Amino acid sequence: MKLSVGVKLANTLSLTPQLQQAIRLLQLSSLELEQEVQLQLDSNPLLERIEDYELHQVENKLEKQSEEQSLDNIEQKIPDELAVDTDWDDIYSDQPTALATPEFEEREDNRTTSPDLHEHLLWQINLLHFSPIEQIAAHCILDALDERGYLCCDLDEILQSVQHLAEQAGLIEDDSDPSEAIELAEIAVVLKRIQRLDPVGVAARNLVECLSIQLENISENNANISDLIKKNAMNLLQHVDLLLNNDVVRLMRSTKLELDQLKDVMLLLKSLDPAPGAKFQPQSQDYQTPDVIVQLKSDCWHVFLNPDTLPRLRVNNYYANMIKRADQSDENQYLRHHMLEAKNFIKSVDERHKTLLRVATCIVNHQKGFLEQGLEAMKPLVLREIAEELELHESTISRVTTNKYMLTPRGLFELKYFFSSHVANSDGAEHSSTAIRAMIKKMISQENPKKPLSDSVLVDMLKADGVDVARRTVAKYRESMNIPSSSERKKLL
């Protein structure tokens, strides 16, 4: 029970700063890596890019060589003596000069930003002859529209907002006569006029009102639609729950329409826009830069890193030559410290690229069937298989495949896309869940719209193709692809 001092020898694994940096760089995307490289360039004077000045010198050298060759060709083409009837264009070709192309061209910017829903409706409201109070009501209605163009609050709330804003503007007084107060019917009139603007049906309070307004507008401007079809469509909108569930039998029973009549009415309703304001929403475009590129050359798949995402770094020779071995001054220690950091960072980036290329090559070797035949030939693959083959840890494979993209002839995919779970049959054969999803999607795309395939039928068809899965598995895969059930996919056409 006494305190004592002893010596013990043991092997332990510790995360050095260099190893921590390598692990952190391994899981960064191409954009995050570029930011990290720029941060290191700003903080470390001994680290520099190779392309900063060398590429510019190479381009200038090539440009001078091309200019000298063009001048030599011009001098060789001009003969010493010409005939009297010689045409100038036959001898002298049109050669571009430096003055032919201005140094700074004025280019017209054709990129136009489309107005949003609020601006589009406000432009139309300003053309209407609204009173000041009606203008306030119209602005309050526009502020209450959601991204679909629907009115997301009650008229009573809009009425309170209009009264408050009108009092602030001095249009009405707090102690005014009740007969001069703003009524709910005035707000309803303004709302009705806004609903007839472009796009028709905007500011509707529900789906039935939105489609009904569009039906009224179509019947007035389109002579091909009879009043009977309009009446049947209005009647059909009263059973919107059955319409959304595509319950054809109950719809025919409730509306007392024949199958041909119901078909015409549903075609008319499908031509309407259930969300008039959605087309005015800005479309978000997410672009991804591939880290790995796969190409087929001479019947062999070649994998290489994208050169645009590879930072070319090196140690600055000017500052490196200033380091003295026996000097212990602060300046020399500063340069030596940053010299070590620059070398470690370049080594970590190089190791990241090598590991990424090894993992991508291994994935391509396992998924050649997908690259040659498509999704149905995707093989089951897990992180453990790649880790065992490359003699790496599963966590390393997970870091490498996170936010890394591969450009293939079939499109751009994340590296994690090529990993899928195993679905084993009773005979021991294994299939990829991605391949089974592709097979289900293909079967549904080829089905008869009048008699869509149920999940049980899909199970039997998959068994015929050698894939033995349960019905609940088929339903799970179908829902993951946002494919509705057979009753919802049934069509009258």
Image (cartoon, rainbow, N blue to C red):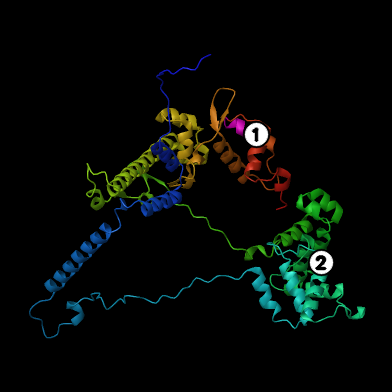
What x and y, as percent, mark residue 243?
78, 53
Residue drawn 12% across the image and 73% down it = 75
Nearest to the observer: residue 308 or residue 329: 329
Alpha carbons under labels 2 and 1: distance apart? 48 Å
Residue drawn 41% across the image and 41% down it = 21
**Which image quadrant for residue 467?**
top right
What range is drawn magenta here? 461-466
> What type of secondary structure mainly makes up the magenta span?
helix
Nearest to the observer: residue 217 or residue 35: 35
Badge 2 is on which residue? 157
Looking at the picture, which amino acid does disc 1 mark? Answer: Thr
Query: Is label 2 or label 1 in front?
Result: 2
Q: Earlier in the sequence, mark 2 or mark 1?
A: 2
Nearest to the observer: residue 438 or residue 261: 438
The kind of secondary structure element at disc 1 is helix
Looking at the picture, which amino acid does disc 2 mark? Answer: Glu
Magenta segment includes 77: no
Left or right placement of residue 252 versus residue 308 in this view: right
Left or right placement of residue 352 versus residue 229 in this view: left
Left or right placement of residue 81 versus residue 463 in this view: left
What x and y, as percent, mark residue 444?
63, 43
What x and y, as percent, mark residue 374?
49, 41
What x and y, as percent, mark residue 475?
67, 38
**Which image quadrant for residue 371?**
top left
The kind of secondary structure element at disc 2 is helix
In the depicted structure, whether residue 362 falls above or below residue 295: above
Q: Which mark is residue 473?
A: 1
Magenta segment includes 464: yes
